[in-house]
Amino acid sequence: MVRQPSPLPSVDALLRAPETQVLLIRFGRTAVTAALRDCLSAHRRLLPAAVPAARIIDEAADQLSARFARSQRLVFNMTGTVLHTNLGRALLPPEAAEAAAEAMRNATNLEFDLASGRRGERDDHVAGLLRALTGAEAATVVNNNAAAVMLVLNTLALGKEVPVSRGELIEIGGAFRVPDIMARSGAILREVGTTNRTHARDYAAAIGPATGALMRVHQANFAIVGFTASVPAETLGALAHDAGLPLIEDLGSGSLVDLAQWGLPHERTPRESLTAGVGVVTFSGDKLLGGPQAGLIVGHEEVISSINRNPLKRALRLDKGRLAALEIVLRMYLDPQRLAERLPALRLLTRSEAEVRATAERICPVVAERWPDRAVEVRTCRSQIGSGALPIDMLPSAAVAIGGKSLEELANFLRSLPRPIIGRIAQGRLFLDCRCLEPGDEAAFIAQLR
Ligand SMILES: *Cc1c(COP(=O)(O)O)cnc(C)c1O
């Protein structure tokens, strides 16, 4: 028997080939061998034809580049939504990102009291700042606001009823639905009132021996208008106080400062809630606050203590990187005059229409040059705050609007660039809202299109 010599090179020969050596340095022996084997067997399955080694190595190189390419990449957010949940919400100030990276690369006193040499509490790095900024007696932090709501309910109302207005049984994009989170937390939802009108007497009638807490949920991403009624926090706080029950409020975005001072619509602050008589308030770290993903819980000392004793707290706690970033961001609030300049989320939200328009005017010729057959012009548009904050208030902005046929194809192309550009199709045009394209990013945007 004479075996036909294979028309394909052997893996060993391919590994020894000079072209393979750079791949070995870049990707390592295991991955390169696997990729070469993969490409060889693909050819073997086709025809037993001779294939040059160089071609197989090329194919393996492509496969390796794709496999080692980063999945999470930088994009240009030109959607017009500043706090875009799918694009990572608030951008951190560089100081905060650096503090996070440094903490992650090094040992820190995360849970270590340097004065006594004993064990410390990780939340202590931010609890004092949160107390100062909200006026709360105590504060604690977890993975995100969904975790905060879940933990508060599980701590205060496990197996007990929690009356919530039917007008506040909200969904915040897909997975966060108030009734579902409540069920998973072990609390029993007791719906009160109607979609458009809920009165104090509705809550009063629902309170009984089975009640564990009262809860308000900020109507974050929608507005009910017309024949409406809801119960102010003050009234609900008094009702809860008289019944000896805690009042919980999920604020969602919850800004730490009054945004009206920058001409933005007012968003309820945790301090206002606490002053009104709410016992425990939860809000997000990466929405209007402008920090890392986190869930912040502020309120009465005894409530926060019992939350901290809940075994679930451990499962939901923050890591040292995000704690480091959060600490830096919270400290920026101690200097509110410079906040709009230093905190990217606020800086983007407060960019004037004229400034955004100037950016649009600068990049418009580059876009027009790239697509000479399309109508390209600067257009007035409206940006959104996003993340469910202040849903009906839109910020005057400017975009480069691209017209013409097959806008979906154009959008696909923009998303396929090394740094994908994410726009928005509306009114038969592809809008590239320039609010989030700061002068520092303009050069990169232009270079990529050229
Ligand atoms: C955004 C939001 C949540 C969820 O917060 P995450 O930080 O995304 O977990 C919960 N409740 C309200 C009212 C919200 O707006």
Image (cartoon, rainbow, N blue to C red):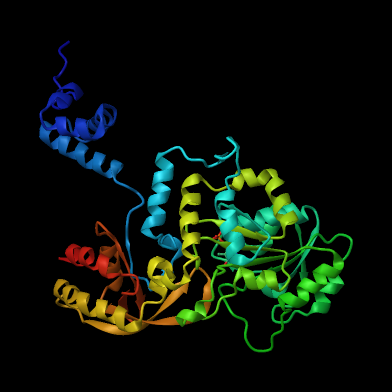
The picture quadrant for ligand 1 comes to bottom right
| Residue at the extreme bottom of the image, as rendered | 226
User: Residue placed at 52% from the left, 77% from the top?
Assistant: 391
| Residue at the extreme right of the image, as rendered | 209
At which x and y percent is residue 326? 49, 55
User: Residue placed at 72% from the left, 60% from the top?
Assistant: 300
Using residue 284 as the reference point, say whether residue 273 is left or right of it: right
User: Residue placed at 38% from the left, 74% from the top?
Assistant: 80
Between 1 and 391, the residue placed more toward the observer is 391
Image: 99 above or below 346: above
Where on the picture, by quarter, is residue 117? top right
Image: 116 above or below 366: above
For the question of whether residue 75 can be seen, the reply is: yes
Between 346 and 72, the residue placed more toward the observer is 346
At which x and y percent is residue 438? 30, 69
At which x and y percent is residue 47? 18, 34
Image: 318 above or below 137: above
| Residue at the extreme front of the image, as rendered | 115
Between 137 and 176, the residue placed more toward the observer is 137
Looking at the rendering, in which quadrant would you find the C terminus? Answer: bottom left
Between 211 and 24, the residue placed more toward the observer is 211
Using residue 273 as the reference point, say whether residue 417 is left or right of it: left
Using residue 80 as the reference point, say whether residue 271 is left or right of it: right
Where on the picture, by quarter, is residue 232? bottom right
At which x and y percent is residue 307? 70, 51
Q: How many marks?
A: 0
Looking at the rendering, in which quadrant would you find the N terminus? Answer: top left
Where on the picture, by quarter, is residue 112? top right
For the question of whether residue 403 can be seen, the reply is: no
Image: 14 above or below 325: above
